[in-house]
Image: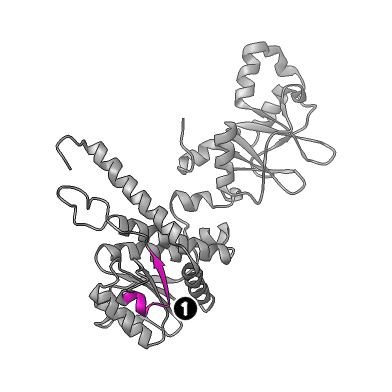
Amino acid sequence: MTRTDTDAALAQRILRAEARAIEAAADAVDEHFDRAVDLISSCAERHASVLVSGLGKSGHIGCKIAATLSSLGVTSHAVHPTEAVHGDLGRFRPDDVAICISHSGTTEEVVALAAILRQDGIPVIAITRRHPESPSALERLATATIDDGVETEAGDELDTPLLAPTSSTTSALAIGDALALAVASRARFTDEQFAKRHPGGRLGGLLRPVTDLLRFRVGENLPLIEPTETVRAALEHGAEAGRRPGALLVVDPKDGSLAGIFTDGDLRRLVRADAAKLDAPIADVMTKSPRALQRSALARDAAIMIQEHRQDEIPVVDEHNRPIGLLDVQDLIAMRLVEQD
């Protein structure tokens, strides 16, 4: 880096170099990737484990790959290659599969682990730089070799090279994600299965059933309003259950289906425009056929509706469009599932 380079310019060069590495890895994907997915999928079906190993920075990438596989339903653990040959080999079972990461393909500890596993008949998936004319030691031991596509590390061209793995670890991380998602796609891994393995945090919260989030429920604290009731009577009706919800749900008296919604915002606008309309039938001022969520929806669906339609109160209905509850945007804000404007 010359003194005329800015930090921002250097950052752009590094990021573009790493992006090119991922592009090269994508271009190199071939039947070896399919073979690796076959191995991991079969391992998952046997309820065996995928053990991921790498040394140094590659070991940290291996930890992330193992965590991603685990969150997608594949039992997976990271294993340090040095500790493996000093006792941790007992963690490997005949039905397991190993992923070994080494950009050079010559990392002594990783190659030694792969050799032992190969002797024990455990398949090895290598993430490394492939050299077709002169395969590395790791590539020769591997059952499937995925090319990381990296010829030079980002930063190698600087006056003072960074001397740290950059593009190769970025590429290995992306390959691990691709493997995990390909295995999950083949297994038709569902949102519900993911939620069971990731119940915490915002991501887990977004996968909760919307019915779990309802504070206002029909038959408990959410009265239903008939279209002929006046706005004033409907408001009094709504207050009977205690804390009034942020909207009133109006139903068709014939079949109980959702006919309309009247929100606090509607009330404020009505009073400002013509307070006399408080004695008009609520059917005259409600929003007819409002957007609603099915009881099978997830919190994620509610968050999308709020973001796309700016809808603060969301009716939740059954398969016959009959209300079962009302979801308030403030509940999602409190759970940090959506952000307050």
Depth order, front residue of 322/190 = 190
Q: Is residue 221 above or below residue 227?
A: below
Location of residue 196 in the rendering, given as x and y in whole percent from the top left corner: 51, 61
Q: Is residue 139 above or below residue 72?
A: below
Residue positioned 35% across, 74% down in the render? 139
Tell me which colouring the rendered structure shows: one colour
Location of residue 76 in the rendering, given as x and y in whole percent from the top left corner: 41, 71
286 relative position to 177: left or right: right
- Amino acid at circle 1: Ala
Magenta-drawn segment:
138-147
Residue pushed farthest front? Answer: 133
Location of residue 10 in the rendering, given as x and y in whole percent from the top left corner: 24, 41
Q: Which residue is mark 1?
A: 48
Depth order, front residue of 39/77 = 39
Location of residue 39 in the rendering, given as x and y in whole percent from the top left corner: 49, 75
Which quadrant of the figure contains the N terminus?
Answer: top left
> Which image quarter: residue 171?
bottom left
Residue positioned 39% across, 54% down in the render? 22
Q: Is residue 197 above or below residue 7?
A: below
Depth order, front residue of 282/287 = 287
Residue positioned 83% across, 41% down in the render? 255
Can residue 139 be found in the magenta stretch? yes
> Which image quarter: residue 305?
top right
